[in-house]
Amino acid sequence: MQIPIEYYLILSAFMFSVGVVGVLTRRNAIVVFMCVELMLNSANLTLITYSSYLGDTVGQLFVFFVMAVAAAEAAVGLAIIIAIFRNKLTINIDEINILKW
Amino acid sequence: MSLELILSIVFGGICAVTALLVITRINPVISALFLVVNFASLAGLYLILNAQFIAIAQIIVYAGAIMVFFLFVIMLLNPESEKKFFSHKPYIKIFTVVIVAIVFVQIIYMIFLAQPSEELIKESAKSVNAGTIEQIGRELFTNYVLPFEAAGYLLLAATIGALVIAKKKFE
């Protein structure tokens, strides 16, 4: 029996929603970054699903690029968090609000 | 029930539960460890979907490199622990959850409105062929060689940028 494609799409949508909730509600900057990774992975799951069901390689290629961008984003983001922690001794994003209008 | 179905339900369930645990645990270390489990079970789903190379890359790059990086930063900063999920500003959080739940229902509605599974019948041979490293490599070095180079350049720039930003003092 073939698994319907909706199964993977719903799982992906669920993971994306959970990631959005995490980004909007958590106050720890590192956890916010982890939730962004969760959202990127849910998009990857959709790409892989369609790539597999259509028999097309390009979707998996894009996942490869998303992984490269995610690695770069994590490196720069965590470096920014370290720099902020050095200056303000906190990574609570409620207290990092000097750019807030 | 085929093995494929059982495995995809198991891995999918682990994915969903660990995703929820990531955002509800107070200690960031525990969140990070649940995220590793989430990535590993996603790799299992990729294997079921015949994407062998991406599954291995998922384990090595995400569960290996990126999460070690996260854990190192958590160890270096030792952030003060957060309050319980709904104790700090509960109304804003409940509001957020409700809004995202509405968006989630909309996505589900669109998925079933489009009825993709009536048109998409997975052909195993084509699907297996698409996931091989040979096929990915051929595509990567012919049609997508410019994005590939750009990704390499991006990683170089990110490495240098991370070093410069995290450095103690500019001299």
Image (cartoon, helix red, strand yellow):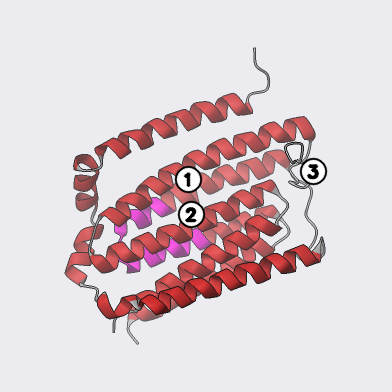
Left or right: where B27 falls relative to B17 = right
Q: Which residue is tagged 3?
A: A95
Give x and y (percent) for residue B60: 42, 49
In which quadrant will I find the C terminus of chain B?
Answer: top right
Mark 3 burial class by Cα count in 10 Å: few <14, some 14-19, many 20+? few
Left or right: where B29 falls relative to B66 = right
Q: Viewer-proximal residue, A52 or B21?
A: A52
Left or right: where B85 falls relative to A21 = right
In which quadrant will I find the N terminus of chain B?
Answer: bottom left
Please, what is the three-letter code of the amino acid marked with disc 2? Leu
Q: Is residue B97 above or below residue B59?
A: below
Query: Going by the picture, which residue comes out furthest to the bottom?
Result: B1
Q: Magenta region: which residues?
A: B38-58
Labelled pair 3, 2 in contact (Cβ < 8 Å): no
Please, what is the three-letter code of the amino acid marked with disc 3? Glu
Q: Which residue is tagged 1?
A: A70
Left or right: where A37 falls relative to B140 = right
Identify the secondary structure beneath mark 1.
Answer: helix
Give x and y (percent) for residue B170: 65, 16
